[in-house]
Amino acid sequence: DVKVTQSSRYLVKRTGEKVFLECVQDMDHENMFWYRQDPGLGLRLIYFSYDVKMKEKGDIPEGYSVSREKKERFSLILESASTNQTSMYLCASDGRNEAFFGQGTRLTVV
Amino acid sequence: SQQGEEDPQALSIQEGENATMNCSYKTSINNLQWYRQNSGRGLVHLILIRSNEREKHSGRLRVTLDTSKKSSSLLITASRAADTASYFCATWEYGNKLVFGAGTILRVKS
């Protein structure tokens, strides 16, 4: 059974902290994505990666960075967390005809 | 930018009725996908329709694609309370960028 695992289901961080969200897939997929989801706005693409060490900005990359040192792992980094980054974060891995999602991380920045 | 835009934003129907959701997109596509999200969870792939297909069925799901109008529709027949969820369309942009719309929230009342 295919699997995308996000490191935390819920996370509470303080303003200014550096936050790491981890995502691991076991399907040997090349493409991986990070989205944030806010009510009424759907899924907005933050960053994506099409290969190890390769990354591309999505539609809302400001305030975020990513790391892909190994094919199976794609990390999202909030350099200095702010309250407007409180959101649901979703990681996905893509097999070209179907994307597989993790369970999501609900991040609250206080 | 949002490649896929769903319509309506929210839909409330009685169990047994049909539910139709629409999606519009902006650029040329190779395929269009529909996903479902149960409350607060990751998305699950429902169905993919290729650009050379006009209609596709999967169980109670029927998807149509009109490339001349850059639009797609998802029909769920004989809806059930368990169909209550958010539904999203997704398309590929510039090769490796998978983008989603704002989604349609479907509520099926029993």
Image: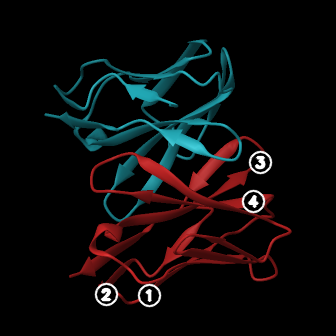
Chain colours: A cyan, B red
* Disc 4 target residue: B31
Q: Using a 10 Å C-alpha cutoff, classify the residue at mark 3 as few (fewer than 14 neighbours), some (14 to 19) or many (20 or more).
A: few
Asked if badges 2 and 3 are on one and the same chain, I answer: yes
Q: Looking at the picture, which amino acid does disc 2 mark? A: Ile
Residue extending furthest top?
A69
Q: Which residue is mark 1?
A: B18
- The residue positioned 26% from the left and 34% from the top of the image is A82
Letter of the chain that mark 3 sits on in the rendering = B
The residue indicated by pointer 3 is B94
Inspect the image, locate mark 4, and give the three-letter code of the amino acid beneath it: Asn
Residue A60 against residue A69 in the figure, above or below: below
Q: Position of residue B89 (x, y in %)?
A: 56, 63
Contact? badges 2 and 3 (CB < 8 Å): no
Q: In the drawing, does residue A105 fall left or right of residue A71?
A: left
Q: Residue at x 31, y 60 (%)?
A: A39
Q: Is residue B105 above or below residue A79?
A: below
